[in-house]
Image (tube, rainbow, N blue to C red):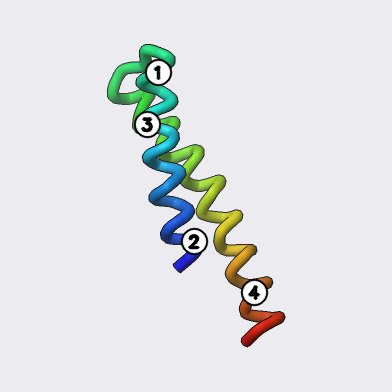
Amino acid sequence: MLAIGGFLLGAVIGAIRARQLGGKAADMAQYAFGIGLLLGVTGLFAQVILLRFFG
C-alpha cells in the first residue's frame, strides 16, 4: 500500500510542480510519472523494511 500511495502522491506533486513551472500537458505527465516513480520505489522499500521488522 505504501508503494501505491507513494506513486499517487508523487504523481499529484509532479503535476502541480510542472504546472507551476508553466509546463504543458506532456510536461505535467512527465513530471507526474518521474516523481511518482521515485516516491513509489521509496514507498516499496519502506514497506519491505517495515514488513521485515514487524511482520
Residue that numbered label 3 is attached to: 15
Q: How far apart are marks 2 and 4 (CA)?
A: 12 Å
Question: Is residue 35 depicted above or below 24 in this figure?
Answer: below
Q: Distance between the residues labelled 2 and 1?
A: 26 Å
Precedes in sequence: disc 2 or disc 1: 2
Q: Position of residue 6 (x, y in %)?
A: 48, 54
Which residue is rendered at x = 45% and y = 68% of the image?
1
Precedes in sequence: disc 3 or disc 2: 2
Instruction: Tell me the element at label 1.
Output: helix
Who is closer to the viewer here, 24 or 16?
16
Look at the numbered discs 1 and 3 and tell me whether their residues touch, using CB distance below 8 Å: no
Where on the picture, by quarter, is residue 26? top left
Q: Residue 3 carries which label?
A: 2
Precedes in sequence: disc 1 or disc 3: 3
Precedes in sequence: disc 4 or disc 3: 3
Q: Which mark is residue 37?
A: none
Q: How far apart are marks 4 and 1 (CA)?
A: 35 Å
Question: Is residue 10 depicted above or below 25 in this figure?
Answer: below
Look at the numbered discs 2 and 4 and tell me whether their residues touch, using CB distance below 8 Å: no
Which residue is rendered at x = 37% and y = 31% of the image?
15
Instruction: Tell me the element at label 4.
Output: helix
